[in-house]
Amino acid sequence: MGDFAVNVAMSYQIGAARGIFSILSAMGISRDEFFSHIGRSINSLVLKHRGDLDRKRLMIAVQRLLKEQGLYLGEVTGELDAATNAAIRQYGVAEGLLYSELVDSLRTAASDSEHKTRWVDQTPEYSFHICGLHKLFPCALFIHIVRDVDSVVRSMLNFHRIAGTNVVANEEEAYKYWLRTVRACLKAEEAYGPHVVYRLRYTTLVENPESALRSLLDFLGEPYSAKCLEPLSQRINSSNVPPDFESEDPATDPAILEEARRLSAEIEQTCQPSLHSSAAADELEAEFGARVKHTSTSR
């Protein structure tokens, strides 16, 4: 999705070369308005299809339950067909439930997704595209989860245990990747301020999860619920690093290692900026424009 912002900008730049932007400019349509309009369309599309997906997942769960009970012999499709409907009625009778009440509860659960107004996505690559994503989604909020570099490197080097693929080739590449992503997030913190980018320390999330989540939800403008703590009862997206794993690679450049650990320590000891910086925002804007220009002229 991060690259999508660049691709949209690239298409925009090419279109401008062909005269499209001159038409938009003549109509008083700015570049930022153009991007945000595309972003609103993407947002509506994602929310609509997420609702459809939630309803299908719910019906798949129902069909599997009915299969286990021997009441449904059809395929698990996620569609409420006649056979599923009949099986639901039988299940209701068997469990002493009114058919109408059971169906209403299913419909209520399925309709919950229709009231969702935001969606969440994550990947470290977004760190490099916050400026472009901010243009597409002006109301988007970004969460920068900070964790000490050595733990992150250990996790990256063991990622193949859960994904079957390597994130990085070696230890030095892992430290370099951490430096690039974290610096990009720090620049975004400086450029857009704490009302757009929120720094969340991993140690706080682990050691004091309720406090961390309350603060995070305040940033998002969402109410706190104790249920928010339930996913934290187990480690999510963990690379399951073995206790005896040693990541010390003699081939790693000591200067890279020192640079990463120094920055990691600095972040732990300092707070994020309380105000946004116009100069930092202009710098990100210039980098974004240069990337767009390079992409459009290299095709």
Image (spheres, rainbow, N blue to C red):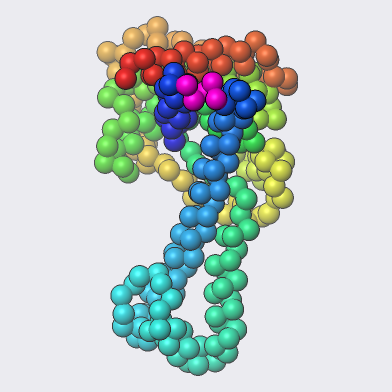
- Picture residue at 54% right of the left edge, 51% below the top: 47
Total marks placed: 0
Can you say whether 40 is above or below 32 in the image?
below
Q: Nearer the viewer, residue 285 or 185?
A: 285
Magenta span: helix, strand or loop, mainly?
helix
In which quadrant is the N terminus drawn? top left
Can you say whether 215 is above or below 55 in the image?
above
Q: Nearer the viewer, residue 42 or 175?
A: 42
Q: Is residue 255 magenta?
A: no
Give the magenta-colored segment's residue range. 19-23
In which quadrant is the C terminus drawn? top left
**Image-based side of 172 in relation to 269, left or right:** left
Q: Is residue 21 magenta?
A: yes
Q: Nearer the viewer, residue 296 or 127?
A: 296
**x then y, percent, for residue 88:** 46, 84
- Picture residue at 55% right of the left edge, 16% below the top: 284
State the image quarter where residue 104 is shown.
bottom right
**Image-based side of 274 in relation to 19, left or right:** right
**x then y, percent, for residue 107:** 56, 73
Q: Nearer the viewer, residue 214 or 124?
A: 124
**Image-based side of 211 in relation to 16, left or right:** right
Q: Is residue 269 visible?
A: no
**x then y, percent, for residue 75:** 30, 75
- Picture residue at 31% right of the left edge, 26% below the top: 168
**Image-based side of 96 in relation to 81, left or right:** right
Can you say whether 26 is above or below 82 in the image?
above
- Picture residue at 48% right of the left edge, 55% below the top: 49
**x then y, percent, for residue 240:** 37, 41
Can you say whether 155 is above or below 178 in the image?
below
